[in-house]
Amino acid sequence: RLKENLLIQDISIRALAHLAEIRDPETGNHLRRTQGYMQALATQLREYPRFADFLTAKNIQTLVKSAPLHDIGKVGIPDHILLKPGKLTPEEWEIMRTHSRLGRDAIEQAERDTDQPVEFLRVAKDIAHYHHEKWDGSGYPDGLIGDAIPIPARLMALADVFDALIARRAYKVPMPFEQAVAIIRDGRGTHFDPAIADAFLARLDEFQTLAEIHADSEAER
């Protein structure tokens, strides 16, 4: 019964994540790559005293399972903004930023519909809501600072930004790996939790391998 329930969870997550992916054709293998990055970061950080209590084997599994829902709120963004090939206007950008709260609200509604708490939904909600927060408080939607940002969201913040840098988009070419690494390094202590940035730097080879294994095909670019 437990195995069946876990399978249902996995299928449900994938179905929801692909719903967002269908709305945003530029996603490609972004979901697979960011799952791999989350796994790499969490595995590296589980030995750090500040993260050890949270990053148990079970919680790491939940993190990786929940990661594909980070942009589920994009299903609520109008096509003329979500699919725009050029730069967004300030007004359009404000609408795009609402995807974090839309994602939180959707997952929160799913939580209300369950008879008992579901851990992966709680983690998925934190990731969807807060993965655009920054360590120095300059992010959105709530301007959280430092450890006030949930750990799952801090991990996704780095994974998501790194993948956005190296991926091809309608409005940009992919950034070279070394240049993307330099931007993450420069964001240590401002955009990113310093320890998470250090974990990324310690796992560079793994990040590069994941990026290559799950690279978008020509048809997806």
Image: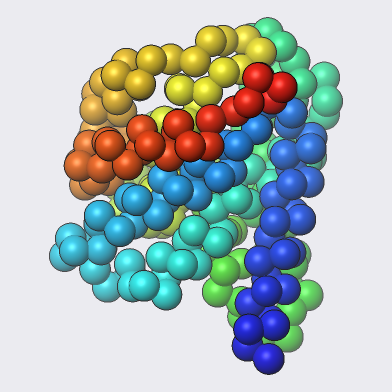
- In the picture provided, is 180 more to the left or to the right than 198? right
Total numbered circles: 0
Residue farthest to the right, as pictured: 79
Camera-nearest residue between 129 and 195: 195
Which residue is drawn at the image coordinates 53% and 30% (left, top)? 215
Residue 157 visible (yes or no):
no
Camera-nearest residue between 26 and 142: 26
Which residue is drawn at the image coordinates 66% and 13% (left, top)? 170
Which image quadrant: the N terminus? Answer: bottom right
Q: Position of residue 121 (x, y in %)?
A: 61, 67
Which residue is drawn at the image coordinates 33% and 73% (left, top)? 56
Which image quadrant: the C terminus? Answer: top right
Q: Position of residue 93 (x, y in %)?
A: 64, 21
- In the picture provided, is 141 more to the left or to the right than 109? left
| Quadrant position of residue 190 | top left
Which residue is drawn at the image coordinates 63% and 51% (left, top)? 69
Residue 127 visible (yes or no):
yes
- In the picture provided, is 53 more to the left or to the right than 219? left
| Quadrant position of residue 3 | bottom right
- In the picture provided, is 141 more to the left or to the right than 143? right
Type of colouring: rainbow
Q: Is residue 178 above or below residue 124?
A: above
Q: Position of residue 196 (x, y in %)?
A: 27, 45
Q: Is residue 87 above or below residue 156?
A: above
